[in-house]
Image (cartoon, helix red, strand yellow):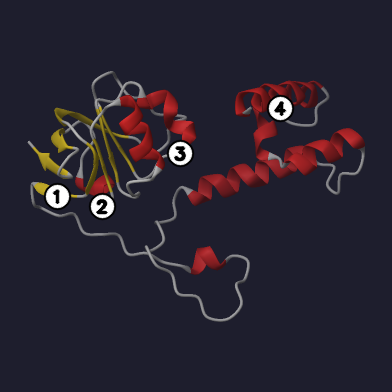
């Protein structure tokens, strides 16, 4: 269903681009369904779709520079727009130890090169490398097939990473706090998906 919806939206995007409403066909993915249908059916509140796309691209770019929020956030009073920008999370110091433990959720032991991936749209994974990520979602599935193991900062036994790793039969460790800072891109590491142990070599 997602694939079909994506094809339909891409077709609409090409039409919008041809009519000069947006700069590229893929800019359609920065608009809401209501905004797309509103432009087609004539009930849109905003008519400058290109400006909306530029605004959202700038917001997405800004979001990549913000630190992750803490695992628990305490909010007093009413929630207000922009609250997330007021939440500051201290970056964990790099641990000099050679070994850390997370939650093992797919058994197996692999020694290979770690590839730290922050954005699956612009970064890839060579076959046999170990995927190291902050978190994953269904959009990451294209690079999962090349991974020999998966290490994720966040997640649980029922998280997306854990379920896909078990389906593919590759070792997986989730909940390894600070993994993105601790593991360097291109470093050799050993991952034990049964015990949750990750060790630098």
Residue on which disc 4 sits: 9
Seen in the picture, residue 70 relative to 52 is either above or below; the reply is: below
Q: Which mark is residue 100?
A: 1
At horizontal 83% and vertical 24% (from top left) the residue drawn is 19
Mark pair 2, 4: CA separation: 37 Å
Of the residues under marks 3 and 4, which one precedes in the sequence?
A: 4
Q: Quadrant of residue 197?
A: top left
Of the residues under marks 2 and 4, which one precedes in the sequence?
A: 4
Mark pair 1, 3: CA separation: 24 Å
Q: Are marks 4 and 1 in contact (CB under 8 Å)?
A: no
Residue on which disc 2 sits: 178
- SS type, badge 3: loop
- SS type, badge 4: helix
Q: Quadrant of residue 94?
A: bottom left
Q: Residues within 10 Å of mark 1 (few under 14, many from 20)?
A: some
Mark pair 2, 1: CA separation: 10 Å
10 with respect to 45 (left or right): left
């Amino acid at each position: 269903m997602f694939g079909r919806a994506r094809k339909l939206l891409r077709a609409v995007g090409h039409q919008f681009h041809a009519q000069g409403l947006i700069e590229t066909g893929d800019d359609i993915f920065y608009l809401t369904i209501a905004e797309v249908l509103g432009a087609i059916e004539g009930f849109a509140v905003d008519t400058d779709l290109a400006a909306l796309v530029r605004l959202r691209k700038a917001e997405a770019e800004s979001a990549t520079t913000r630190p992750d929020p803490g695992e628990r956030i305490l909010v007093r009073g009413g929630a207000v727009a922009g609250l997330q920008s007021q939440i500051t999370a201290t970056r964990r110091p790099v641990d000099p130890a050679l070994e850390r433990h997370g939650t093992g959720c797919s058994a197996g032991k692999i020694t290979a090169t770690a590839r730290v991936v922050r954005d699956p749209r612009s970064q890839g994974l060579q076959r046999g490398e170990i995927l190291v990520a902050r978190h994953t979602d269904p959009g990451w599935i294209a690079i999962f097939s090349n991974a020999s193991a998966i290490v994720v900062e966040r997640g649980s036994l029922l998280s997306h990473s854990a379920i896909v790793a078990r389906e593919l039969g590759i070792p997986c460790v989730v909940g390894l706090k600070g993994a993105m800072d601790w593991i360097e891109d291109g470093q050799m590491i050993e991952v034990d998906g049964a015990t949750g142990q990750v060790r630098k070599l």
